[in-house]
Amino acid sequence: MRRDPAKLAGREFDLLVVGGGIYGAWTAYDAALRGLRVAIVEQGDWASGTSCASSKLIHGGLRYLETYDFKLVRKALRERQLLLKNAPHRVWPLRFGVPVYEDSRVGMLQLKAGLVLYDLLAGFPGVAMAHRRFNRAAFARNFSFLKEDGMKGGFTYGDAQTDDARLVLELISGAMEIGAVCVNYCRVTGIQETDGKVSGATVEDLLDHSIVQVAARQTVYTAGQWMAANKPTSEWCRLSKGTHLVMPALPGEEAVLLTAKSDGRVFFIIPWYGMTLLGTTDSDYRGDADHVTVDPNEIAYLLGEANNYLNTAWTEQDVVGSYAGVRVMKRSDAASPSAVSRDWELKSAGNGVHYSIGGKLTSAREDAKVIVDAVCNELGITSKCATVNRPFPWAPNNLPEWQAQSISRAEKLGIDSESVHWLMRRHGKRVDEVFHIIDLLPAMAERITPTLPFIFADLILCARDEMAIHLNDLLRRRMPLLILAKMNEAELQHVAKVVAKAMGLSERDIAREVRACLE
């Protein structure tokens, strides 16, 4: 992946996509597969908005059954199954436990009915994903970190997990491989019109501040939270802020779905990269789209609700990291953001510009299909969506054989088993490139920090080949070290020096980039 803004000039594109999150990435990839001439620009880094601040789940949304949003759940479950098939390295199964206590808002019978319906809407996807019921003793044994007092029993059910930022990155990489021009750190500053219809955009390269006129027959905005600041899109959007905390690891490899005692909201405790994600909050957001921060009251809320269930209470000193994101939802008069549908819609302005409103990480592929269908209809192009049964760009051909070969080679190179497990999920078939780096530099098989399954060779590959402009891009989205570990200045300087050559960083650059990460 090489950043080349010069490719934006001197040609006409069929489609310009504005916004490089999950919706923009799927739209660009889908359109490029159909043969369209595609450009996508992102004012920050790929997935630097909401698409790197999710719960990292590919799921149907069990809680949406309570609001009778069966259509959304069925759609998301269908997409979950599709992603598990097309991207087994990128999307993997994750089971959830749901305890039922004497004072639980939802009892055993009601939860059983909901889980049966969840399996039904998923098309009864097999034993691995189907729900199971446990008595009190068995459930408490499986989830030993939960309080047993008052527990009546519980259930487990199947959903899936991903690394959201790398999901976006792989789609951008795939779009580039088939001819799309993809440039991060480029901001659209104005729309060009001819006879009242969109004909392109003025784009500023935020690295050198050069200006280019991008000619495009169609334009789609997939800019997420930034669309809420301008008309007409502000009239279509409602913003909700979600905060997650990174906590120490808990026993087991399954997640837990819990209900907040203070307000009845659902929240999750999820294993991720050997740590634990706790989230999320759900509150209306009217702040600055460029500076979404974690508030102390949100930390207190999540810790307090989790501690209602945990045997050993978490404190603020246990918080390793945190992040907040802003979801875009369709305009609604519902009192609480939790009651607003997560479904998606496509809006079009009088000048022909299309706007993607709402949606979910899980169902973005299907929604992007609708976007590109609309674009093709306007252009008089009849090509069909090609993403339904297509393996992901980095997906291995034969998963079991590839896994066995990769593990064997990693052992010979001295990579620990947990790190190679995550290497395969992070890079898919590109993991051979990590191995090649270690062939040349054996010391790069070492972990960056002892507690996390990341090695230096992985970091070098990301720095060299994944369009990371700043150290923060590398350590937040290419590899989420900044939220999974408390890195001090000396550790950041060491990492920066390791990747300096690959990223073209001078000593002055290193000092600036380290300072930005610390801030």
Image (cartoon, rainbow, N blue to C red):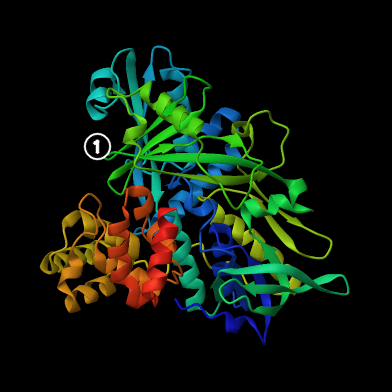
Which of these two is toward me, 330 or 512? 512
Residue 279 spot, x, y in % from top left? 44, 36
Which of these two is toward me, 349 or 402? 349
**Residue reaching furthest right?**
195
Residue 208 spot, x, y in % from top left? 58, 77
Q: Is residue 397 visible?
A: no
**Residue drawn 28% across the image and 22% down it:** 311
Is disc 1 surrounded by few (<14), some (14 to 19) or many (20+) residues within 10 Å? few
User: Quick check: 15 left or right of 440?
Assistant: right
Which of these two is toward me, 168 or 96? 168
Amino acid under disc 1: Gly
Residue 229 spot, x, y in % from top left? 72, 51
In the figure, residue 353 lies in which quadrant? bottom right
Quadrant showing the N terminus: bottom left
In the structure shown, which secondary structural element does the residue marked by tag 1 occupy?
Answer: loop
User: Quick check: 344 left or right of 323?
Assistant: right
Residue 471 spot, x, y in % from top left? 41, 64
Tell me if residue 66 comes above or below residue 503 in the rendering: above
User: Quick check: 180 left or right of 461?
Assistant: right
Q: Is residue 283 visible?
A: yes
Tell me if residue 493 comes above or below residue 230 in the rendering: below
In the figure, residue 383 lies in which quadrant? bottom right
Q: Which residue is mark 1?
A: 252
Tell me if residue 202 comes above or below residue 220 in the rendering: below
Circle count? 1
